[in-house]
Image: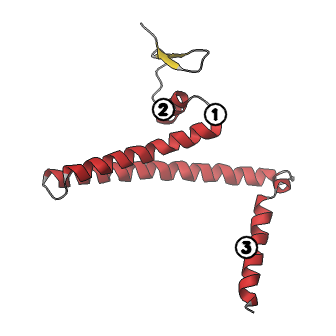
Amino acid sequence: MNFTKIRQIFFLTLVAIVLTASNVYAAEGASIFSSIADKADNVAGGLKNAGYIIAGLGLIGFAVAAMFNKISWKTLAYIMMSTFFLTLITAIITWTQSGSNINNTLVEESGAYNAGASAEVPGGDMVKTKR
């Protein structure tokens, strides 16, 4: 029998159990885990912004290529739609985890909130107010 493979599986299982144990987060060193989580959130936010910049530059490049008939306009439309849906997935995941209104989540993530443009109603829907 190949005991090396069994040892590797056992070690990975042990690591997974230690990392996912709920009492680990309840220990006195919980501040260590919260600081690691905060740093990971900061890195993820920076990577998300860098990804948006790279995607925007890529879309500009594909648009120029479509103008010079290097790729078809149909392909450009597919690329633009897929980029839009990938961007929207972040808001959808945040919405499903928080359980809040999807419009609030989209507004908070875009940072484009205009206090006079919309008002929250008790039903949870966003409606336009007349000025």
- Residue at horizontal 59 percent and vertical 21 percent from the top: 124
Q: Position of residue 51 (x, y in %)?
A: 43, 52
Q: Which residue is mark 3?
A: 12
Name the front one of labels 1 and 2. 1
Q: Which residue is mark 1?
A: 99
Q: Secondary structure at mark 3?
A: helix
Q: Position of residue 70 (x, y in %)?
A: 16, 59
Circle nearer the N terminus (3, 1): 3
Q: Which mark is residue 49?
A: none
- Image quadrant where residue 7 sits: bottom right
Circle nearer the N terminus (1, 2): 1
Looking at the picture, which amino acid does disc 2 mark? Gly
- Residue at horizontal 62 percent and vertical 53 percent from the top: 40
Q: Which mark is residue 111?
A: 2
Q: Is residue 84 left or right of residue 41?
A: left
In space, the residues marked 1 and 2 are separated at their CA atoms by 19 Å
